[in-house]
Amino acid sequence: MLPIGGVARLERMPEDPTQEMVIAAAGPLVNVAIAAVLLFVLWLGGGLAEPARLDLLLGDAWLGGSDPWSFLILLTFINAMLVLFNLLPAFPMDGGRVFRAILTRTSGDYEWATHVAATVGQMMAVLFFVVGIMTVSIVLILIALFVFLGAQAEANMVQMRSLFRNLQVTDAMMSQYDVLRPEDTLDLAAERLMAGAQRDFPVVDGGRFVGLLERATLVAALRERGGAAPVGDVMRRDVETVAEGELLESTLERMQQVGFHTLPVMRNGELIGLVTLENVGELAMLQSARRQRGVAG
């Protein structure tokens, strides 16, 4: 299911199951190494000499005991619990990524493997939530929400990458749009904003793209400077542009990294269109509908 009212954030992970398994295993292994070092220090210093004392120390550690070994024992216990937690086959934990890698290697279908792993993760999250309600455990309830939302985000991200694979930025480009000039007033920009669905306006000077007036900037400038102020004084000049042949997936990643809602699309230095998050989201819905129609047919 695609996210409503927006686009899933694309965080690139390797689709090769072997690479993903290696990366996912690195986190738990770090915790294992830390726990092993702490256990060695405790053993070397005599902190584990008596099992009964260990139980007492562990209890003291949770209560902030003053025993010199309590802190080390607490750290060892936390790292051991982190290993077990991260190995659960649920996104976004490392165990969920290992589970997906195994499914991908078995089936050869990365998207299907993600769907299955995300579903398992959400089922576990529901179980955590129920247990958390029954035991009145706020921590377990928060973990359940974290796992459920993380699994959904992972599934959305992979589906989005699949829908956009091999598409270029021009496939989601807005080719009909209004432009402003640096000498135009903010009142004129406000009129253009109210007249249509466009929220960000490219600013051109003599046919050359020179900046972008974003909706948030327009509203703030109207409040601070008034409607008679020129667009050129408040527009953003540090705007990244995208070439018409760039892949849509990489363009979306860049938009999310730089925090731009709109990017100008250029051809040989000339503005030919705009790509916005709304357009990308609409294309995703269309691609999803076409895919479902193809499967149904």
Image (cartoon, rainbow, N blue to C red):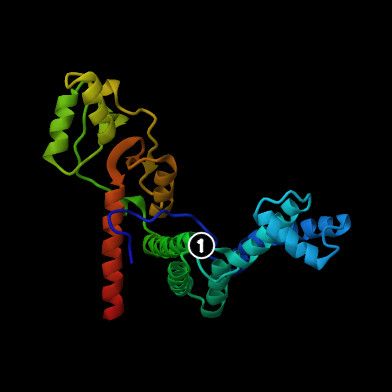
Report the label total. 1
Query: What residue is shown at x 38% (from left), y 43% (from top)?
Result: 243
In the displayed structure, 58 sits above or below 274; it is below
- Rendered-image quadrant of the C terminus: bottom left
Q: Is residue 6 left or right of residue 57?
A: left
Q: x and y percent of residue 233 in the render?
A: 29, 20
Examine the image and state in which quarter residue 227 appears.
Answer: top left
Residue 119 locus on image (x, y percent): 43, 73
Q: Which residue is depicted at the point 27% across and 34% down?
A: 216
Residue count near mark 1 (Cα–Cα under 10 Å), binned few <14, some 14–19, many ≥20? many
Whether residue 250 is situated above or below residue 135 in the rendered picture: above
Asked whether, in this view, residue 124 is left or right of residue 167, the answer is right
On the rendered structure, is 156 left or right of 182? right
Residue 65 visible in the shown view: yes
In the image, 87 versus 186, the foreground residue is: 87
Q: Nearer the viewer, residue 244 or 182?
A: 182
List the residue tagged with mark 1.
92
Give coordinates of residue 203: x percent, y percent.
Answer: 26, 30
Residue 14 image-quadrant placement: bottom right
**Amino acid on which the number 1 mark rests in the picture:** Pro
Nearer to the camera, 215 or 33: 33
Which residue sits at x=79%, y=57%?
37
Q: Is residue 257 left or right of residue 228?
A: right
Q: Secondary structure at mark 1?
A: loop
Q: Can residue 111 be seen by looking at this rendering?
A: no
- Name the one closer to the observer, 129 or 278: 129
Q: Position of residue 269 (x, y in %)?
A: 35, 35
Relative vertical location of residue 175 with respect to residue 187 in this rendering, above or below? below
